Image (cartoon, helix red, strand yellow):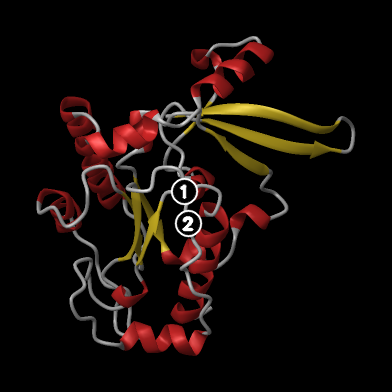
Amino acid sequence: MDLINKINNSRKIFKKYLELEWDVSKVSDYSNEEIEKLYTMKSDNNSLYFGKASNLNMTLNHKNIKDHKLHIIYYNFPELNSPPLKVTKTCGDKILSLYTNELINPEDSIILIITEKISENIEKTIEDVYKKGQEKLIIEGISDNINEQNMKLDKKYKREHFRNIHLFNINTLGFDIGLHNSVPKHNCIRFKDDIKEILKNVNANDQQLPIILRTDPMAKLLRLSPGDLCEITRVSERTGEYKFYRICN
């Protein structure tokens, strides 16, 4: 599958998994020809410009907290029909600068997509940026406008829901792994009262549940944050449908 096709598929996959919480109404369904044109077109006045494919970056608004944004960034993509460009540790500095230079808001979240295979070093670099962001939110708190919108909700989002960063390799987005026969249905449960009720029903506390990492492929698609529950539904010929739970860490 060529790069243009993978990008087009990635947009459809994100649209599917994000539509529950994010306004994806402005995410256009493009043909591969339109994707290629946007890929090669020069980008002007784009504060989230990181090379080729930057015209395909997306910024989504949260459905319940309107001032909370999610930026989907195609980072350091090469010329078409060229090998993947190497992503170095400076990637972390560039992403961090979006916050420090106030190009995006302190609570904004990011999905970062690269063409190179995700190495341990790059994954650690992005995780370090994520952890620094969480530490900043702990110290400085959530901004007044975001906090005010959150407080008006019946079900409130915890701090860890904000300033999330998830890293993808474009090759993993050429197809929807959630549709694979070996992958059971995954569902995200974020809210405190819902989690409390589930733990009561399964007679367990959060320390007793198995873990799903933030970097797990399905956890990234669902944008799980620490403390969220992942409800996994399996189907067995012997026992039928059954659910079990993992806690994000």
Element marked by disc 2:
loop
Kindly give the residue lying farthest to the right in the view shown. 238
Give whichever of 128, 106 is nearer the camera: 106
10 Å crowding of disc 1: few (<14), some (14-19), many (20+): some
10 Å crowding of disc 2: few (<14), some (14-19), many (20+): some
Give whichever of 68, 215 is nearer the camera: 68
Q: How far from the left and from the top, in percent, is residue 246?
A: 56, 28
Q: Residue at x 42, y 35 (%)?
A: 225
Indicate which disc, 1 or 2, sits on the residue closer to the N terminus: 2
Q: Amino acid at mark 1?
A: Lys
Residue 93, relative to residue 27: is it above or below?
A: above
Mark 1 in CB contact with mark 2 (< 8 angstroms): yes
Q: Residue at x 57, y 58 (%)?
A: 16
Q: Amino acid at mark 2?
A: Asp
Residue 239: quadrant of the picture: top right
- The residue tagged 1 is 63
Element marked by disc 1:
loop
Q: How far from the left and from the top, in percent, is residue 50?
A: 22, 70
Give whichever of 44, 90 is nearer the camera: 44
As measured in the structure, the alpha-carbon distance from the residue carrying label 1 to the one carrying label 2 is 6 Å
Classify residue 217 as left or right of residue 54.
Answer: right
- The residue tagged 2 is 23
Residue 186 visible: yes
Residue 230: quadrant of the picture: top right
Figure label count: 2
Residue 64, relative to residue 147: is it above or below?
A: below
Which corner quadrant holds the C terminus? top left
Residue 34, relative to residue 69: is it above or below?
A: below
Classify residue 235 as left or right of residue 77.
Answer: right
Q: How far from the left and from the top, in percent, is residue 99?
A: 17, 49
Q: Residue at x 51, y 45 (%)?
A: 222
Give whichever of 196, 9 is nearer the camera: 196
